């Protein structure tokens, strides 16, 4: 998949890239099959001939099987077909899948969205899957209706961010852009739905994944569950950036009363 992602982000036709990683099931693990998926999005004009684009995509990637996405609005699901289909972008953007696997309001959702530079991609995804299994979180991974419930595997999604600025002096500290020479950044979305008695295990999983991320000089979105160390916070933003923030904080909020505890170690 590593090579396919590089092809996708460098192809002028491709406007978006999403990944899908299988964690493990008894059946597939028994026959040593670990499927992964790469979803590419291509914008086309309403009446554009898509046959040349289809041929290009089939020849570009090394997939064992290629499917084309369709949005079944009447059933609120994403379908798949061997035949290419064009649909308005809004049908996908505003789709909220109606899953048969109900996620009730009595479940909690410890999530994390970590990522690393491209050079660590293979090791990163491999180790994340191991950590999920180690903490017994495979069965709690959030599942939505995909392919009309014909495919229902324990997976977690991912995303690819193409690097547009390589000058380290121009890296915005609040972004997930990692100052490296790699062409792109690979992130994953670990989304669990757990009963309250499993929350501590889920948080343990997230903490271990975040430890791995910062060992690989990566970052994690700070919107979700996290218990970062001072060293990890300094790696995330940079010591000089934090120093400047603290100077502004001391001037405008000398008693440090605002936003206490929002981000660890920055009060």
Image (spheres, rainbow, N blue to C red):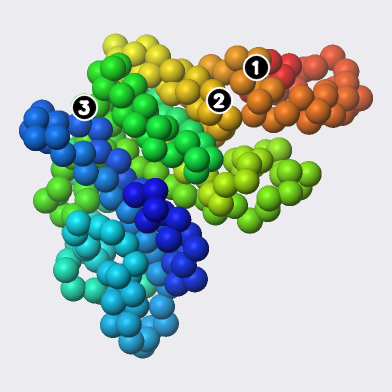
Residue 199 drawn above or below residue 247: above
Mark 1 secondary-structure assignment: helix
Residue at (31% x, 24% y) in the render = 130
Q: Which residue is mark 3?
A: 139
Say which of marks 2 and 3 sits in front. 2
- In the rendered structure, which disc, 1 or 2, sits on the residue that comes first in sequence? 2
Position of residue 128 measured from the top left corner of the image (x, y, whole percent)? 37, 28
Residue visible at 84% across and 14% down in the picture: 255
Could you tell me which secondary element the residue under label 3 belongs to?
helix
Q: Nearer the viewer, residue 32 or 150?
A: 32
User: Between residues 232 and 102, which one lies in front from this camera angle?
Assistant: 232
Few, some or many C-alpha atoms within 10 Å of disc 3 (few <14, some 14-19, many ≥20)? some
Residue 189 vs 210, above or below: the answer is: below
Whether residue 106 is visible: no
Query: Mark 1 and 2 residues: CB-CB less than 8 Å, in contact?
Result: yes
Residue 174 placement (x, y as % from top left): 67, 38
- Which label number is shown at residue 231? 1
12 lies above or below 63:
below
Say how many tags the image has: 3
In screen coordinates, is 99 left or right of 250?
Answer: left
Is residue 112 visible in the rendered image? The answer is: yes
Spatial CA distance of label 2 from label 3 is: 26 Å
Q: On the picture, is 50 further left or further right than 150?
A: right
In what element is the residue under mark 2?
A: helix
Q: Position of residue 264 (x, y in %)?
A: 64, 18
Q: Which residue is mark 2?
A: 214
Quarter location, residue 53: bottom left
Residue drawn 59% across the image and 52% down it: 163
As drawn, is 181 to the left or to the right of 125? right
């Amino acid at each position: 998949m590593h090579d396919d992602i590089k092809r996708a982000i460098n192809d002028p036709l491709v406007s978006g890239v999403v990944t899908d990683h299988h964690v493990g099931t008894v059946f597939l693990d028994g026959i040593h099959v670990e499927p992964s998926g790469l979803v590419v999005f291509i914008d086309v004009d309403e009446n554009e001939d898509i046959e040349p684009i289809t041929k290009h995509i089939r020849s570009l990637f090394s997939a064992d099987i290629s499917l084309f996405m369709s949005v079944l609005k009447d059933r609120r699901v994403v379908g798949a077909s061997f035949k290419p289909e064009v649909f308005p972008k809004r049908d996908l953007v505003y789709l909220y899948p109606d899953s048969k696997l109900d996620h009730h309001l009595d479940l909690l959702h410890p999530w994390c969205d970590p990522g690393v530079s491209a050079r660590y991609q293979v090791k990163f995804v491999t180790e994340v899957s191991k950590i999920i299994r180690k903490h017994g979180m495979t069965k709690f991974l959030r599942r939505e209706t995909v392919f009309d419930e014909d495919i229902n595997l324990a997976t977690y999604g991912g995303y690819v961010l193409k690097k547009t600025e390589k000058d380290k002096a121009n890296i915005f500290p609040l972004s997930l852009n990692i100052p490296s020479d790699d062409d792109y950044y690979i992130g994953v979305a670990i989304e669990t739905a757990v009963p309250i008695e499993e929350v501590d295990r889920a948080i343990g999983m997230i903490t271990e994944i975040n430890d791995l991320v910062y060992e690989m000089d990566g970052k994690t979105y700070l919107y979700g569950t996290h218990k970062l160390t001072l060293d990890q916070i300094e790696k995330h933003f940079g010591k000089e950036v934090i120093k400047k923030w603290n100077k502004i904080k001391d001037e405008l909020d000398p008693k440090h009363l605002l936003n206490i505890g929002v981000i660890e170690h920055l009060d």
